[in-house]
Every structure is written in structure tokens, then in C-alpha cells.
Image (cartoon, helix red, strand yellow):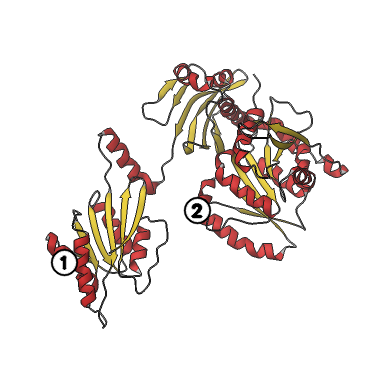
């Protein structure tokens, strides 16, 4: 059986780009994809490697067109930027997507069914401003399809929290050394990407990037993830394993996962032999594509004698998000097969406690514990260094007690100032509670106390215009909160559940 091997394409990738040296234009073929309920099919351009063979694996570049994104723009982009990659062993696809970006997910699925994609994930790129804007839109909408993003000019969406979806992808910003304005903007763009947890790189080129620059850039990206020798064979087997699932090729998939293999799923009850897993998975393969997991990174270790290999890889899936696969492969004859595959979902440490609580509640058939934190600023104050409340403030403190009358308050916190303690005094007296006093600047400590000591309870906190936003942030509220000097009536209700912090902003 032939595997979809990235090594097969590597030899072409390492060849000199003869078409560039001769000035030869790439051969661009336009194809059509029927789209259900659409008036017209979606057209797209393709450049194929020389002697293209459908059973072989090739790296695939998905290039967003510039300008009007019509057929002329696609053809121009292929000639100017992307088409030369065909001579280096790449498949290059560029969609005619003016007014059709909503159909691109169907095209991406079609490409995965049509081609065997080396290293599993496509490469996404755009040159010129309109194309770069489209790159970020499709990259953030369909992150599970791509292993890298390349943009020229070096533009990044502003205040885009969804950038974190691109975790693990290689993001490259190309900067023309002659473009001072673009170079000056790069630090801001890098800061946005790093704030989202990404590790971007800047690629400087002399003058404007052209086909030769992009060909070298993508060849280097591909080489970064190409493993040599037996480790490369193992990596090719894993790529073929995932590709067979994405194409719904049951025969190829279970040739790589034999009857005596073990598959461990994400649920604790999911432990199958290869034979058992085949019976379980048959309905998925019968429907067409079974499931799609795109490798983002992979490590392979070889045993002495190179007949066994251990691996771990990070994967992305549309439904389950970022997953980890690990296990063992064995060489049988001239073929590597999977002896054990363990699919898991990594849980960030910061949310592990909530996930554990959800699992326990599910097992015990109960509702997960939820902590409610009511945060207010002190009421209107008098004058002086540490003033008490004025008459308006005292009336507001009584109002707070009445507003919260239906809540079963378990604990009350105030800062070490008279005005915050006075704000919660009527509430404490009505509940026979004593407010616990903490220094105003100890918002991190206070948030920790609430989470640790008051799980599942209702807590009321009185703070200041500068400490209330800080406390909300420490509690996990993502949206920024600001307060003005005259804001005395704000009442923030934070719900701390297994899904994080949710904020409700009220007035009293």
C-alpha cells in the first residue's frame, strides 16, 4: 500500500525553481465546485506539480486573491506571487471568491477530499491589503484547516480575541525592507499576536515580495516540519492515517490500525482493540468523511533498531478543538502500523478545577457548583482623608441591603476604609454577618479567597472605583470594565461556573 508521504514531495521542494530561472509562467487551471442552493458554482484556480499523482502527498497553499477577488485577480496573483510553487512540488489553490467567502468552507472540505495534503494542514497566505484581510477572516473562521498563515503586508486584526484560535500555528509577517511604514507597524502587530499566545516571525525581503521570495519562504516552512529517515516514515504513516479518516477510506485507515491495535478515545470508557474500533467506527466511514484531525505539531522518537516508534502530536478538530494524539507505531515488513493511539483533550491548568467539578457533578448527577460574587463600589462619601458616607451614601447602603434581600449571602468583604465598610453595614446587620476586611490593593488575594473558600456560595464585596475593575479582572471577567468618579450605583454580578466567569452589570 502506498502512503501519502511528505517525503515524496520534499525532493521536489528542494529542487531549484527552474520555472523562475527561465521566466516560465505557471500553468493555471480553473475548476468549478458545485455549491448547493447557489446560482453558480464556485470557481477556483489550481497549479499542480510536474508529474502530479493523486495518491502522493503534496504541501498545499491556499492563497487568497487581492483586489476584486475575481478571476482576473486570481490569475494575476498566481502569476505574480504563488504559481512558482508548483515547480517546487506544491499544489496551489486560489478561489474566485468575490461575494463568495461564505462558500470557502465547502471548498476547503473539497480540497481535503481531492488531494493528499502533506503534513496534514494547508498553508494560508495573502499578498496585498485586501487579500490579507481575507486571510485573517478565513483563518479565524476555519483555523482547523491550516498549519500556517503568511501575510504581506504585515497587518493584523485589531482587538481580535479570536486570534487565540490560531494557537500552535506558524504565523509569518512579511516586511519589505523598503517599506518604512510597514516596518514601523510591525512591533504593534507582533504585540497583538503575542498577546493572543502566538509566536509570530518577521520575514524581511528586499523590495516587494515576489514569486521567488514566497517560494523560498514556503519551502523553508515545509522543511521545518519535515522529519528525516525512519522518523519521516512514521510521520508519513500518521499523515496517511488522518487523511484516510478525513476521506472516509475505511480500508486504508484500518490497514494502518490493525485488529491487535488499541485505540483510546477521549471518554474514559473508550478503550477499543482495532477490531472493536472498526465495528464502532463503521457508521462514520459509511457516511463519507469520518472525522478530520489536522496535525499542528508532531514529535517522533525511535527505539533502538528502528522497529518501534513513539509519537505525540497536537491536532485541531472543528468540534473538539485542540487535541493531543500519542501512541506507538510498529514496523511490520515494509509498512508502519499504529499499535496504540491515545486521543485526549488537553485542559489548561487555569480551567482544570472547573472541568473537574463538571465531571464530578456529572458522575454524581447533580448541578455543578456555581459561585456568585456581587461587587459594588462604596456609596457616596463625605470629605476628609478616610471619610464616612454622607447622607446620600447612607441611603444607598440601605438600598443595597433591600436589593440583595432575596440572595442568601454567605460572606461579605470590604476594604480597610470606612466608606466601604459602611456601604455593606446594613446588609451585614440584616444577615447577622461580619464583613471581612482586606487591604484595598489585595484584589488578587481576595479573588483567590473567594474561589477557594466560598465555592458554591454568594459573596458580596465593596471596593473602590479603581479596585472594582481590578477585582473583576482577577475573577476572570474578560470584557474590560471602567468606572467614573460619579459612578456610585453600579452593581456587578459575577457568576463563576465551570465555563468561566460571566458578568451581569446592573444599577441600584
Q: How many marks?
A: 2
Query: Which of the two residues, 303 or 413, is positioned nearer the viewer here?
Result: 413
Left of 39 or right of it: where is 457?
Answer: left
- Label 1 element class: helix
Name the image quarter holding residue 55: top right
Question: Disc 1 vs disc 2: Cβ atoms closer than 8 Å?
Answer: no
The answer to whether 319 is drawn above or below residue 464 in the figure is above
Q: Residue at x 36, y 49 (%)?
A: 500
Marks 1 and 2 sit apart, C-alpha to C-alpha, by 41 Å
Q: Residue furthest right?
A: 22
- Rendered-image quadrant of the C terminus: bottom left
Name the mark nearer the viewer: 1 or 2.
Answer: 1
Q: Residue at x 30, y 41 (%)?
A: 357
Residue 505 percent across, percent down from the top left:
34, 59
Residue 494 percent across, percent down from the top left:
32, 55
The answer to whether 215 is drawn above or below residue 479 in the figure is above
Using the rendered image of the protein, determine whether residue 234 is visible from the camera's viewpoint. yes
| Among the two numbered marks 1 and 2 on one chain, the one whose residue lies closer to the N terminus | 2
The answer to whether 504 is drawn above or below residue 380 in the figure is above
Query: Which of the two residues, 31 or 278, is positioned nearer the viewer here?
Result: 31
Tell me the residue that label 2 is attached to: 161
Left of 260 or right of it: where is 83?
Answer: right
Please rate how many residues cluster around mark 2, counting C-alpha atoms within 10 Å: few if below 14, some from 14 to 19, many from 20.
Answer: few
Query: Which of the two residues, 280 or 422, is positioned nearer the viewer here?
Result: 422
Tell me the residue that label 1 is attached to: 426
- Label 2 element class: helix
Query: Which of the two residues, 195 or 478, is positioned nearer the viewer here?
Result: 478
Name the image quarter holding residue 116: top right
Residue 166 percent across, percent down from the top left:
54, 46
Amino acid at each position: 500500500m502506498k502512503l501519502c508521504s511528505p517525503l515524496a514531495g520534499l525532493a521536489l521542494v528542494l529542487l531549484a525553481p527552474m520555472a523562475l530561472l527561465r521566466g516560465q509562467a505557471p500553468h493555471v487551471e480553473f475548476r468549478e465546485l458545485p455549491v448547493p442552493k447557489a446560482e453558480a458554482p464556485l470557481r477556483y484556480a489550481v497549479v499542480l506539480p510536474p508529474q502530479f499523482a493523486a495518491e502522493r502527498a503534496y504541501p498545499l497553499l491556499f492563497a487568497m486573491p487581492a483586489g476584486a477577488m475575481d478571476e482576473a485577480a486570481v490569475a494575476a496573483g498566481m502569476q505574480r506571487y504563488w504559481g512558482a510553487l508548483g515547480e517546487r512540488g506544491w499544489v496551489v489553490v486560489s478561489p474566485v471568491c468575490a461575494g463568495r467567502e461564505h462558500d470557502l468552507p465547502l471548498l476547503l472540505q473539497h480540497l481535503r477530499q481531492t488531494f493528499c495534503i502533506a503534513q496534514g494542514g494547508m498553508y494560508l497566505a495573502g499578498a496585498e491589503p485586501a487579500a490579507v484581510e481575507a486571510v485573517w477572516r478565513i483563518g479565524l473562521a476555519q483555523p482547523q484547516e491550516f498549519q500556517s498563515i503568511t501575510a504581506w503586508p504585515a497587518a493584523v486584526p485589531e482587538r481580535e480575541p479570536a486570534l487565540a484560535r490560531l494557537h500552535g500555528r506558524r504565523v509569518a509577517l512579511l516586511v519589505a525592507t523598503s517599506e518604512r511604514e510597514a516596518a514601523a507597524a510591525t512591533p504593534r502587530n507582533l504585540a497583538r499576536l503575542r498577546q493572543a499566545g502566538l509566536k509570530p516571525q518577521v520575514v524581511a525581503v528586499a523590495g516587494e515580495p515576489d514569486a521567488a521570495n514566497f517560494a523560498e519562504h514556503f519551502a523553508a516552512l515545509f522543511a521545518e516540519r519535515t522529519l528525516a529517515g525512519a522518523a519521516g516514515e512514521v510521520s508519513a504513516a500518521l499523515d496517511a492515517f488522518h487523511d484516510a479518516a478525513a476521506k472516509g477510506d475505511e480500508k486504508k485507515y484500518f490497514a494502518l490500525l490493525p485488529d491487535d491495535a488499541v485505540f483510546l478515545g477521549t471518554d474514559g470508557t473508550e478503550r477499543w482493540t482495532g477490531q472493536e474500533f472498526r465495528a464502532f467506527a463503521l457508521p462514520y466511514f459509511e457516511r463519507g468523511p469520518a472525522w478530520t484531525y489536522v496535525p499542528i505539531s508532531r514529535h517522533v522518537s525511535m527505539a533502538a533498531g528502528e522497529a518501534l516508534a513513539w509519537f505525540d502530536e497536537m491536532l485541531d478538530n472543528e468540534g473538539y478543538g485542540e487535541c493531543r494524539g500519542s501512541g506507538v507505531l510498529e514496523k511490520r515488513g515494509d509498512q508502519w502500523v499504529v499499535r496504540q493511539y491515545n486521543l485526549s483533550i488537553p485542559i489548561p491548568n487555569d480551567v482544570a478545577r472547573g472541568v473537574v467539578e463538571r465531571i464530578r457533578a456529572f458522575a454524581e448527577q447533580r448541578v455543578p457548583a456555581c459561585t456568585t460574587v456581587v461587587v459594588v463600589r462604596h456609596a457616596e462619601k463625605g470629605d476628609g482623608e478616610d471619610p464616612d458616607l454622607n447622607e446620600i451614601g447612607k441611603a444607598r447602603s440601605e438600598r443595597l441591603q433591600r436589593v440583595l434581600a432575596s440572595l442568601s449571602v454567605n460572606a461579605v468583604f470590604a476594604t480597610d476604609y470606612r466608606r466601604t465598610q459602611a456601604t455593606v453595614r446594613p446588609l451585614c446587620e440584616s444577615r447577622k454577618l461580619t464583613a471581612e476586611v482586606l487591604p484595598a490593593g489585595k484584589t488578587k488575594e481576595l479573588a483567590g479567597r473567594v474561589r477557594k473558600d466560598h465555592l458554591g456560595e454568594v459573596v458580596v464585596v465593596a471596593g473602590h472605583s479603581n479596585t472594582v475593575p481590578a477585582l473583576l479582572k482577577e475573577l476572570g471577567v474578560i470584557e474590560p470594565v471602567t468606572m467614573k468618579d460619579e459612578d456610585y450605583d453600579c452593581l456587578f454580578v459575577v457568576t463563576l461556573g465551570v465555563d468561566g466567569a460571566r458578568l451581569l452589570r446592573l444599577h441600584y
